[in-house]
Each structure stands twice: as structure tokens, then as C-alpha cells.
Amino acid sequence: MKNLLIMRHAKSDWANNSPDIDRPLNKRGKKAAPFMGEELINRNKIPDLILSSPAKRARCTAERVIEVINYKKELVVVKDFYFGHMANIIGTINSISNDNNIIMIVGHNPIWEDLIMSLINTKNYIVMPTAAIASLIFETDDWQNIKENSAKLEWIITPKGLKDE
């Protein structure tokens, strides 16, 4: 069984006049990312591999989660996660070594919402607010078998939803 964690970057700083790819996290985003890392520990969902968009807000989100979960591997930056095409994103997932059972990808909407809806084959709109994490389960031992309509949505968690529990 394979587990894909799809995380949208935490809240970014729109007041910063940087180009889109260089936009940093804002104060709320800097708090939300490690909070979500703590929740991954609570749910026993520690990734074997973490991949991120090259955008600063996504990389910083991943790095803050990494600090909390004590992840020892290098963060893998994937160019196609920055508003790339779904086929390329699924291709990246398909190329992952089967030694990794839980992987986390960190990136952006609207592609992350579209990716989840495609993998679980739903017409219902999936909403991924900033710093949300979706857990998808695949009944396979091979990442090459990941394709549209091959997953079950285990859960979606958000910082606000967790604080309201």
C-alpha cells in the first residue's frame, strides 16, 4: 500500500513585492507549517520522501514541516510542481522508488485540488486552503501504478479545522 500526502503551501506574504516564485510565507504561514508537521506526527504519517515546488513559499513550508518531523533526507525540488501539468506531476510520482511508502508533495492550487479530484475520481470539488494536507491511499506496492481514479481519500486536514476540533 502506498500513501501520498499532498500539501498546499502555507499562507504567503502578498505585501511582499517579490516575483511570484520568490514570495515568502507570512506570519500565519510560518506558524501553520510546523503545526501541520506536528499533526503528521500525531497521525503517524511521517514521509519517507518529501518533494516540493521550487517556489519559495512551498519550499519554506516543506522546510518548516521537515524541522518538526525530524526528517533527515534532502528536500527534493521538482520544477513541474510550480504550476506544471498534471501528467508531469503524476509522472514524477510514478518514478519514485518503491522503497518509499509515504511521500509528501508540497505545491500549489489549483493543480493540487485538480490532482486530488483526478486521483480519487470525484465530481465533488475538493478545497485545499493554505497549509492543508490530503492523505490519499493506493492499494498497490508500486508507484508506477498511480494513475487517475486509483486512490481513496483518507482525510484532508487544515490548520483551522484542527484548531476547531
Image (tube, rainbow, N blue to C red):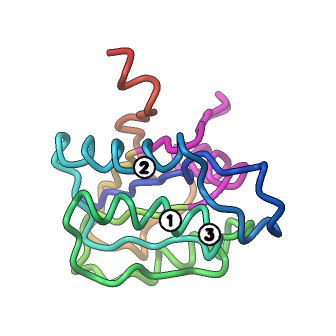
Give percent across and percent down for residue 150: 46, 53
Q: Residue furthest top?
A: 164
The residue that mark 2 highlights is 33
Residue 155 is inside the magenta segment: no
**What residue appears at the point 68 percent right and 65 percent down from the top-left corner?**
86
Quadrant of residue 165 within the rendered picture: top left
The residue that mark 3 highlights is 56
Give percent across and percent down for residue 122: 60, 35
Mark nearer the N terminus (2 vs 1):
2
Residues at discs 1 and 3 in contact (Cβ within 8 Å): yes
In the rendered structure, the answer to whether residue 41 lies left or right of residue 116 reads left
In the rendered structure, the answer to whether residue 81 lies left or right of residue 92 reads right
Cα gap from disc 1 to disc 3, whole angstroms: 6 Å
Please name the amino acid that badge 2 sits on.
Answer: Ala
Cα gap from disc 3 to disc 2, whole angstroms: 13 Å
SS class of the residue under badge 2? helix
Please name the amino acid that badge 3 sits on.
Answer: Lys
The residue that mark 1 highlights is 60
